[in-house]
Image: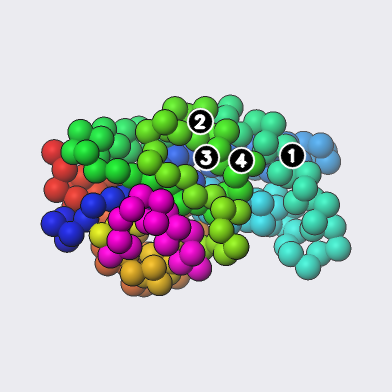
Amino acid sequence: MTAAVRAVLFDLDGTLIDSAPDLAGAGNDMRAARGLPMLPLAHFRPMVGSGARGMLGRALQVQPGHPDFEALRDEFLQRYEARMTRETQVFAAMRPVLAALRDAGRPWGIVTNKATRFSEPLVRALGLLGEAATLICGDTTPHSKPHPAPLLEAARRLGVAPAECVYVGDDLRDVQAGRAAGMLTVAAAWGYLGEGEAIADWDAHHVVESPGELLKLLALP
């Protein structure tokens, strides 16, 4: 695997950064505005990868198709934007992985379904914008994951063949997009994972339990 790998691409939320506290916080802010009690982070965490849709489902039991869904989604996004850097952090165990990639001269990038409106200022605030060789957001290409277009665009910008890239993510859509793009796929078991199929059934090339295992998989010191 490692001989053919020239670049590593990461999903953002749940893979590279722990944004659950602020996404859940925005959901709880909506509950507080309606006189409802706070819910624990654990209630929201599995659905963080689903963004506003997942958070509204957990916070207010509202799903797409509900007559108020769009208005509530807009409110959620406004509340999230106002607080998205308050508690969000890079996973501490991912720092050595990024440092090892830098030391090895191996470029890495971010491919996320999060819109540029949120992704770029968040990645900048976390000090990653200057380190990442590319940032592909949910609105960078006409399609978002599980479509392969965002990953193919990342490879194009890096000047690396898709087959020479690894994509690491914590959602089934990440694996589907990576496989469709012809990349090696790694499922990150430390992430949010959702409540659908078990991670072992995602058909990823590799499943890693921790960023430390990812270092070993990539043969990085």
Label annotation for residue 115: none
Tell me the CA gap for discs 2 and 3.
14 Å
Q: Position of residue 30 (x, y in %)?
A: 76, 41
Q: Are marks 4 and 2 in contact (CB under 8 Å)?
A: no
Pointer 4 or 1: first along the chain? 1
Residue 158 appears in the figure: yes
Q: Are marks 3 and 4 in contact (CB under 8 Å)?
A: no
Q: Residue 67 is drawn in which quadrant?
A: bottom right
What is the residue that sits farthest to the right in this orientation? 67
In the rendered structure, the answer to whether residue 67 lies left or right of residue 40 reads right
In the rendered structure, the answer to whether residue 91 lies left or right of residue 84 reads left
Q: Are marks 2 and 3 in contact (CB under 8 Å)?
A: no
Return the residue at label 2. Answer: 124
Residue displayed at 57% across by 64% down: 143
Query: What amino acid is labelled 2 in the image?
Result: Arg
Q: Position of residue 115 (x, y in %)?
A: 61, 48
In the foreground, 159 or 72 = 159
Q: Are marks 1 and 2 in contact (CB under 8 Å)?
A: no
Tell me the CA gap for discs 1 and 2.
19 Å
Say which element carries label 1: helix
Return the residue at label 4. Answer: 118
Color style of the picture: rainbow
Return the residue at label 1. Answer: 78
Say which element carries label 3: loop
Say which element carries label 2: helix
Tell me the CA gap for discs 3 and 4.
12 Å
Graded by Cα atoms within 10 Å as few (under 14), some (14 to 19) or many (20 or more), the crowding at tag 1 reads few
Magenta-highlighted residues: 146-163
Front of the two marks 2 and 3: 2
Return the residue at label 3. Answer: 19
Residue displayed at 13% across by 57% down: 3
